[in-house]
Structures are given as structure tokens and as C-alpha cells.
Amino acid sequence: MKFNLFDNPIIQAINKVTDYLILNLIWIICSLPIVTAGAALGAKYYVGTKMYRKEEPAVFSAFFYSFKKNLRQTLLPSLVIFLLMGVLAADWYFILNRESSKTVLGIFFLATLMFFMVAFCLFPLIARYEVGTGQAVKMAIGMSIAGFPKVFFAILMFFLPFLFIFLTVKWCWLICLIFQMVMIPTNSRFFVKVFDRLEDTSGQAQGEAGENFLESYGVSREDADKRAEEIFQTLFYGSEEERIYHPAGDDMGYMVDTGNMDARTEGMSYGMMMCVQMDKQEEFDRLWKWAKTYMYQTEGPQKGYFAWSCALDGTKNAQGAAPDGEEYFAMALIFAGNRWGNKDGIFNYHTEAKDLLHNMIWKGRADLPGRSMFDPDNHYIRFVAEEDFTDPSYHLPHFYEQFARYAYQEDRPFFEIAAKKSRKFWEACCHPDTGLSPEYANFDGTPYTVREPYGRHDWYYSDAYRTMMNMALDAIWCGKKEWPEENAKRFLRFFNEKLEEGTWDSVFTVDGKREDEKALHPYAVIASNATAAVFDPEGAKPWVEMFLEKGLRSGDRRYYDNCLHFFAYLMLSGNYRIYE
């Protein structure tokens, strides 16, 4: 929990003014090299629009995230614009120093105005959308024409403070600075309204579509989008033999583990991630309210966590928490706030996520009862808060990079380190010959061989199927491919040999020894192996073909297999997106 002091409206107002002042100053400083002015302007309104949406970005990190991301693309447009400004200044000097008709003056004035309006809109568009410069220019022209009065007002408000330089000398710099600071929320509001219209939904930031790895299998982007919607409808609204989601009352719902007939934080948080990826806010809110109503712990050492299993009537089956559920809850909530905007109470998605993340790393310290889910020394996620070993499939560095942007300011450095440490941990826990990881592992990466009280988990079995999927999504979102690609090739070489032998659906030790048991979730094995196509399309080909051919699993054990199938499909079709 945060100190009540920060809920004081006066303190919040002071913090907001300070943020705007800092934002304005770093914008001015980063604009001084001239050619970086475009990236700085885009970053200014990247942060400004987030502040307007009440997403509470960290000004410095959010500004420089956008600045660095778009610097290369904006260098040439910035240079061209400043050169054209020089040409325009020379032309105006020439026109004003000789007799020119009102018609010429009018035409030239409109051309100059349109130039500045397009320039003003261009860089925030580049900061907002993943588009080429040419497309961004077209969008800026369209924005300027379609919303001429509002764009004109915005450009007037942008340049008006600079007139003080010509009207007065004393304190002109301070007046200019203050005016520009005051105009940030006004202009940010304008851009938010325009972006909302472009995206055809209030408060919705469309994530960038990734590579469609299924295209070579005859699945177009349109076909992939249609199939993703079909899978969602089957899992949420299919027959009783197909669905795993059930509405509860007027405003709640739950995901059922059909193999165990309970609701788990794993499934609830997975369902929320599916909903935010598919733009299903009603179902998202229903799941979140059910989790907060029945699973959330309000007292004792587990306070601030979620009971990992509940009966379908909401009765807690256990008091302990499973950290993978909390991780997915937090990530889904952050995306929900970015995609739909934050509301009040438990639907202030960002605040809920930040409070949860704070508990996950600080419980047991900072006067918070219980124990943290992350080890404070090595930054690894624990299997459960009470134990000092881990589950390799819980390591989600691609999530941690997002947490490092949206968590409370004091929590962000922890997640920056956790992302790096988890990637190194994968190298330690995956076998050097087979690429397989165990279900549970010691902090040094070796398989966790203790069998009480959790049973055997030192082998490549159900939980472990997610590790390859996590590596694939980390590569898609964060571009981390070098070691995972090497591991994926070993992984696929092993499984392709087992495919030829007809033993691929067996249980294996991490060194490749086949056990007598069959995989409890063979469709999950297929989904996991198919996602290795992110690293080795040719090696993964038989698995992608099998993945597309078999589709969803039926029967009592369908829950886990079909969750992984859906995530794999979103990933391979380029539809598992970051929303920011």
C-alpha cells in the first residue's frame, strides 16, 4: 500500500505540475541539436497523452523510451523541416519587401500555415504509430485538413508563447517556458481525441501487429484474425463441451480448469490476457471482479495476493498464491489501462497492477506482512513465496520490461534487473543438448529433485511446456533471440527425432531420457513446439502443420492445452501484442 499522503489532491496537483515542468525542460534540452527536435516533440506528446489518459508514466523513462525509439526515423524529417523553414523565411522576407497582391499573400499564408500544421502533427503520429515516414506525412496532412480548426488552434497555442520574445525582453524566456508547460495538457487532449478517432474506439491504443509466421502455411492476416476470433468464441461461448469461461451473475465470470473443476489464478489471468488481446472489455472486467471478490486476500501473510485455487462457487480451496497468476494479472491490467483507459475502484487497472507488483517484490519488508514472490537478492520469481526454488516457466522477462515502465517509480529498477536475470537463468536451466527445461528448478538452474510436498517436477512436463513459448514471445516483443535461437534449434532437433520415433508425446527428463508416462497435455506440447518457429521456421515446420491441423482439444483436459493453443496462435499470427 502507498502512503495516504500521495492521495491528497494538493500533493497530486503539485506532482502533476512538476511532471509537466520536467517534461517541458527535457523537451527543450533535447530539441537544442535541431535535428533531434522532431524526436523530442514526438516524445513530449507521447508522454503528454499518457498523462492526459491518467496512465501515470514516469516522465524521464517514458520520454527517452519514445525519443530513442523514434530518433533515427525523425532525423531526416527534422532536418528537411528546418531547411524548409529557412526557405519560407527567405520567401516571406522577399514577398514583404516588395509589393505583392493580397491573393499572393493569402495563398502563401495558407501554404505556410499548412506546412506548420503538418509538421506539428507529424512527430506525435510517428511516436504513436509504427508507420513509415511517408505514411506518417499522409496521416498528418489528413489530420490537418480534416480537423483544420482544432489543428489551427493547437498550432497557434504552440507558437503563441514565442511571440513574447518579440513583444518583451524582460522575463520573456520564463513566460515562454510557462506557457509551453501550460499548453502540454491542452495539446495532449487534442492528440488524444484525434488518436481515438483514428483508432475508432475511445482510449484504445492499437498494438503493433507482429510477423505472421503462419503466412507460409496459407494463413493470411485476415484469415488469422478470423481464426483468432473463432478460438475466442469457442473458449468463451462454445458448447459446454468446448467452453472454459462461464459468466457468473450480472457482472462476473470465471475460467474453469476442466481437469480439476476449479478456478485458478493461472486460468483467470490467462483469460484476462486473452480478453485484452482480443478487445473484450466486458469479459475482462467480469473475470477481474470475480478474482478480486473471491480470490483476493485481505488479511494475514497472504494479504495483497490471490488464492491460487477456488471452488466454482468462490470458496477458497487454498490460501497460498501461485506467482504466475499474479504476473499475468499485472500484465493484463497494464495492457487494459493502456487499451481502454483507467476507470474507478478495482477498474483503475494501472493502480491495481502497480499495487500488486509492489507487494510481489516488497512483502516481508517495508512493513508488509508475508514474503515476496521475487527473491530480493537474485531477482528470480519463486515457485511460491514460501519456497526458495523456482519454476522456469514463471520467468517472463518480456513482462518485466513492461513492469519496469509502469510499476511504481521505486519498483522499476528491480524489474529492469529481473528481466536480465531471468534471461540468464534460462541459459542455466535448459539442457545444453536437448534444450529442455525442468518444471521446477533450483536457483542455480539444476532440476529441483525434492518430491515432497509437491510431487515429482524435475522433468520436462506440463509447466515446462511454457518455457519455449516464453522465449518466443520475448523474442517477438523484445528482440532477444541470440541464445534462445541456439536453444530452439537443439530443442527442435530433439523433438523432431522423437517425432520420427513416434514417442514425441512422452514425458522426458531434461537430458532426453524417455519415461514410461505419456504427456498429460499433448496439445500443449504441440503448441509449444510450434512457437519455436519464431527461431527456426524450417525446423518447426512439422509442428506448425500439426498445430494447425489438430486445432483445439476436446474432453476434460482441454483447459490447459487450449489456453496454450490460443496463446501460441496469437503469437504465430502476429496478434500477441504490446499495448502502450
Image (tube, grey):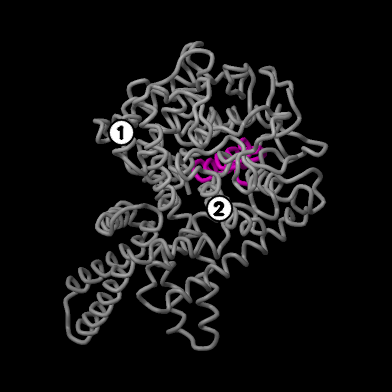
**Sequence-earlier tag: 1 or 2:** 2
Residue 54 appearing in the image? no
> Residue 3 or 531: which is nearer the viewer?
531
- Is 328 inside the magenta-drawn segment? yes
Residue 145 lies, in percent from the top left, at 28, 55
Q: Amino acid at mark 2?
A: Ala
Depth check: give the residue in front, 297 or 352.
297
Q: 430 or 31, which lies in front? A: 430
Q: Which mark is residue 288?
A: none
Q: What residue is shown at x 74% (from left), y 32% (from top)?
A: 320
**Point 27% across, 57% down: residue:** 141
Q: The magenta stretch spans which residues?
A: 323-351
Q: Position of residue 529 (x, y in %)?
A: 41, 33
Give the residue drawn at x 74%, y 24%. Answer: 316
Return the residue at label 1: 541
Q: Position of residue 45 (x, y in %)?
A: 46, 61
Horizontal relation, residue 320 to residue 282: left or right:
right
On screen, 448 above or below 294? below
Q: Secondary structure at mark 1?
A: helix
Q: Quadrant of residue 302?
A: top right
Q: Nearer the viewer, mark 1 or mark 2?
A: 1
Q: Is residue 439 left or right of residue 486?
A: right
For the image shown, how many numbered marks are present on the structure? 2
Q: Which residue is mark 2?
A: 419
Amino acid at pointer 1: Lys
Q: Rounded to the nearest whole Å, what is the CA distance between mark 1 and mark 2?
A: 30 Å
Q: Which secondary structure dominates the residues rendered in magenta?
A: helix
Is 21 left or right of 9, judged from the image as shown? left
Q: Which residue lies at the image location 73% right of the left edge and 53% below the top edge?
A: 7
Q: Answer whether residue 177 is visible to the viewer in this image.
A: yes
Q: Is residue 580 above or below residue 326?
A: below
